[in-house]
Structure formats: structure tokens, C-alpha cells
Image: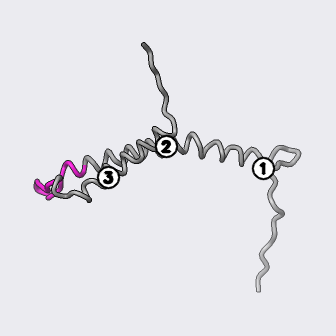
């Protein structure tokens, strides 16, 4: 059975929410992430922060590609163009000195 379900907006929001939860967890419950080692850093907290950033990045990247980019393309393609096909710019004005 080949069940290839693709990412959708709900999955992207879930990825972003899970990533934010992973990022906040060490701050909310510091007792679960004891500071050990020479630098007094928690490997678990560092891993949760990194993976939280990855999860949020995956969710935001999908949402931007699926929703923001098409809107941006529609705005750009709706801009008026002159006969040569280039976008029209306002006339240049010189700056006068004192």
C-alpha cells in the first residue's frame, strides 16, 4: 500500500506548535534538564532548542511556500506594465541644492 500523504497547512501549524513547545520546555521546566559538563550546559536543552527551531522552520517554510508566495506572485503579476513589458516607474526628479 503506497499511502503518500502530502503536507498541508494543518500539518505545518502542528510542526510549528510542536517546535515552539520544544523550545519553551527547557525554560518552563528547568529541573527536567540538569546542567552538567564543563560548560554547565544541558545537552537535552540544547537539543530541544535546536530541534524546536528545525520544527518551526519546517512549518513556516511550508506556510510561506503554500500561502505567502502565491499571493506575492499574484501581486507582482498584477502590476501594470508599459508597452515594452517592463514595469513602469515614476518620473525621475532631480534634487536641488540650497
Judge the density around disc 3: few (<14), some (14-19), many (≥20) Cα neighbours within 10 Å: many
Query: Disc 2 or 3, which lies upstream in sequence?
Result: 3
**Residue 53 placement (x, y as % from top left):** 36, 48
Query: Disc 3 or 1, which lies upstream in sequence?
Result: 3
Residue interval drawn in magenta:
33-46
**Residue 57 placement (x, y as % from top left):** 43, 45
Residue in the picture at 24% in, 51% down: 46
- Identify the residue under disc 1: 79
Determine if the magenta segment contains residue 44: yes
Instruction: Indicate left or right for 38 with 86 as reference.
Output: left
- Identify the residue under disc 3: 23
**Residue 84 placement (x, y as % from top left):** 86, 44
What is the distance, in whole Å, between disc 3 and disc 1 at their CAs? 41 Å
Judge the density around disc 2: few (<14), some (14-19), many (≥20) Cα neighbours within 10 Å: some
Name the disc covering residue 20, or none: none
**Residue 13 placement (x, y as % from top left):** 46, 44
Label 1 element class: loop
- Mark 1, mark 2: which one is toward the viewer? 2
Residue 34, quarter of picture: bottom left
Is 98 in front, or is 37?
37
Q: Is residue 12 above or below residue 29?
A: above
Label 3 element class: helix
Q: Is residue 30 above or below residue 59?
A: below
Name the disc covering residue 61, or none: 2
Amino acid at each position: 500500500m503506497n499511502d503518500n500523504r502530502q503536507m498541508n497547512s494543518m500539518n505545518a501549524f502542528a510542526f510549528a506548535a510542536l517546535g515552539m513547545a520544544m523550545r519553551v520546555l527547557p525554560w518552563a521546566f528547568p529541573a527536567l534538564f540538569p546542567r552538567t559538563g564543563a560548560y554547565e550546559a544541558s545537552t537535552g536543552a540544547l537539543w530541544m532548542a535546536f530541534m524546536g527551531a528545525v520544527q518551526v522552520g519546517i512549518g513556516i517554510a511550508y506556510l510561506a511556500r503554500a500561502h505567502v508566495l502565491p499571493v506575492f506572485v499574484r501581486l507582482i503579476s498584477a502590476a501594470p506594465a508599459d508597452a515594452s513589458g517592463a514595469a513602469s516607474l515614476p518620473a525621475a526628479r532631480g534634487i536641488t541644492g540650497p
